[in-house]
Amino acid sequence: MNHLAAALALVAIAGFGSAAHAGGYVSAGIGADAGLSGEVAQHFTTDQNGSSGRVALGQRLGRFAIEVNLYGSDLQGITGLTGQQSYSSMTAGVNARYYVPLTGHLEAYGKAGLDKTWFVGNADKPATSYSGRGYDLGAGLQYTIHGLLLGELALWVDYTHQSFTLHDDVKRDLGGGAQLLTVGVSVGF
């Protein structure tokens, strides 16, 4: 965690120039299933052939952006606590981003945010649901194509580490996290 904070501080200091980007954007991306950690990984697993998805709406002003996003993945319960059933994870959150120009149209960014996560059982029988709050940290690379008729188009790759504590119907706590690697496209307007 200290290495990530030091790297983000270095990126912020290196990027104190001017930037001309401004405006709203929508984005969508896909990736492999989330990697799980902590107690959550002891009770859930992800499907080896599964995928995750992410959609977002953001507003950028210069090097800073604020973004609301929604992402999710499929899970499988693997213990008596979670049952041998399928679950869907869904996270809604808000992030702040800071962009640093690298070369030409290529930028790096760091991000931090707060979110709410739900794990909901997909079985026909009543299933235990889990929900909780947490935070996420991440970084990415973005290549932007300017001057299109409808606005800007950006291709990106994003790594997010999410940390959360989930509670079930009987108030048991499961701490842990998820790691997501996503590729996608953003359209500016």
Image (spheres, grey):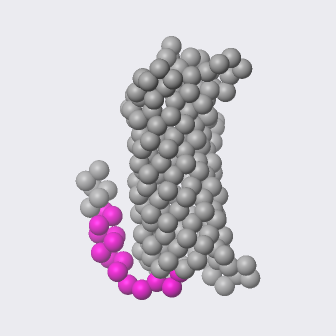
> Residue 48, image x and y in percent?
59, 33
Q: Can you name the residue that lies furthest to the right here?
A: 149
120 in relation to 25, above or below: above
Image quadrant assignment for residue 176: top left
Question: Where in the figure is residue 31, as x and y percent of width and height?
Answer: 59, 48
Residue 181 appears anywhere in the view: no
For residue 126, above or below residue 27:
above
Q: Residue at x 45, y 66 (%)?
A: 97
Q: Quadrant of residue 83?
A: top right
Q: Residue furthest front?
A: 170
> Residue at coordinates 33% horizontally, 64% vertically from top-left?
8
Placement of the C terminus among the 4 image quadrants: bottom right
Residue 13 falls within the magenta-colored stretch:
yes
Name the image quarter holding residue 188.
bottom right
20 over 63 or under it: above or below: below
| Highlighted range, magenta | 7-21
Q: Can residue 49 be seen from the camera position used here?
A: yes
Task: Give the residue at x 60% y 72%.
Answer: 24
Residue 8 located within the stretch drawn in magenta? yes
Location of residue 124 in the rendering, given as x and y in whole percent from the top left corner = 72, 20
